[in-house]
Image: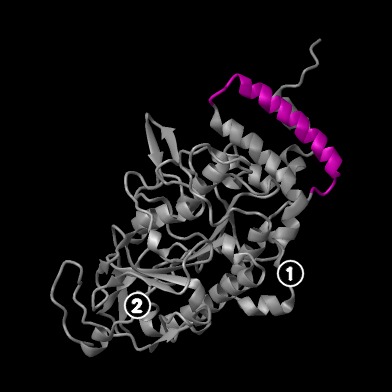
Amino acid sequence: MQNDFSRRQMLESASAGFGMLGLASALQTAGASNLLGATAASTRIEGITNGIAPKAKRVIFLFMNGGPSHVDTFDNKPALIKHNGEKPEKTHLNRGGNWMGSPFKFSKHGESGVEMSELLPNLAKCADDMCVLRSMHTDVPNHEPGLLIMHSGHQQPTRPSLGSWVTYGLGSENQNLPSFVSLCPGNPVVGPFLWSNGFLPGEFQGVKVNTKQLKVEQLIRNLKHPNMTREQQRMQLDLLKKLNEKHLQLRQQDSQLESQIRAMELAFQMQKEAHVAFDVSREPEKVREMYGKSTFGQSCLLARRLAEHGVRFTQVYYVDSGKQPWDTHSDNNARQKTLCADSDRASAALITDLKRRGMLEETLVIWGGEFGRTPYAQKNKKPGRDHHNTGFSMFMAGGGIKGGTMYGNTDEFGMHAVENRVHVHDLHATILHLLGVDHTKLTYRYSGRDFRLTDVHGNVVKDIIS
């Protein structure tokens, strides 16, 4: 009589099934790796550095979903004030509105004189740590393709995201936590494609954490097994791993199975550290208050904690129940006040906190959306600004960036990037460079050809690197 259990029999007879792993809810489907992410290899891919010395170890990307208005935040345009209400020259980019100057005053800040609007008083104190890119441009003015380009360099939802490429190339700093985490209090437009591994192995999928509820047991459900000790879970996981590996021997090219094995191992390892790393309640009240008690504010604080615990790439989304809060088609001026107040406080707190802890030099902070807003008004009872892709602003701080810098310019009305233009591909190339990666060498062979994040494009913006 044969005593060997099959893999299926093992799962059926185990007293807790997948629950023995502690993160049962994340492993309920055959595509478990796509829900959970993974440890990622601890070593970087050979040959991708090409002699580049890394200046940053990790990235925190603060994403303003919907597209913030550059002419109300970082790009001062006196010509808009002068010609406010006048009809611009008719172009395919102008859908009929008149020039709309910003009602917010701009001034220079810090020893470097970085210019920004009165809506950003806290970031103004960080001016000497920031590099404002005022000449960003991208390919399309629509949310879905714009989001995909900013996250993956491609308009279609078929490519790996920036965070997946980074963790594929550089691996993880902490085998007990995911290397790529997306903190998002809902599902933005396009949703999971923004942290997708695409055609990369499943272990490089980003782990999406819903930050609507910040209690650690709600952020990461089923973190602790209700009945089994850690030793008992270890024994069952080891047995399951052996069965999976035996199964894998017959399916050498089954990347999903390999990823699922790694995902289950990560689920177990996360029990060691996740309950600490994800628990913002452990922070002093003074620190929590500094970030602001909003969802975005506390998510920024959580991002700092994850950085401390070795998470390589963290995305923090400013999202409101799946909507795009920065999509100010109407009542732009009033909405900018509310949006900037929240984002300004939290973003500045993150930079300040990282700097105070000696982490800013090795942490690259990025702030921006998928595009900007039009310098002209969109016709509404309460005028707003439409989507705008040919010139907008973002900023970077820390991680080898030359602080106190304003790089590039748009024309006098803020319509088009005209000086030192920076495409999204250039931004991605620069991010990888700061992490010690040559963007032309970070490739993955799929469907008969080599792919990379920047495809056949991208130039490192060397003038902003310290």
Q: Is residue 394 above or below residue 206?
A: below
- Dot 1 crowding, Cα within 10 Å, few <14, some 14–19, many 20+: some
Residue 369 belongs to the span the image colors magenta: no
Q: Could you say where residue 429 lies in the image, as x and y percent from the top left?
A: 41, 52
In the picture of the structure, the residue carrying the numbered disc 2 is 75
The three-letter code of the residue at mark 2 reads Asp
Extreme-top residue of the structure: 1
Q: For the magenta stretch, what is the residue range?
A: 225-253
- Return the mark for residue 281: 1
- Dot 2 crowding, Cα within 10 Å, few <14, some 14–19, many 20+: many
Taking the spot 71% from the left edge, 61% from the top edge, the residue there is 216
Q: Secondary structure at mark 1?
A: helix
Q: Could you say where residue 124 lies in the image, as x and y percent from the top left?
A: 49, 82
Q: Could you say where residue 47 lies in the image, as x and y percent from the top left?
A: 49, 37
Report whether residue 259 is seen.
Answer: yes
* Residue depth check, mark 2 versus mark 1: number of the one nearer the observer: 2
Q: Is residue 347 above or below residue 222?
A: below
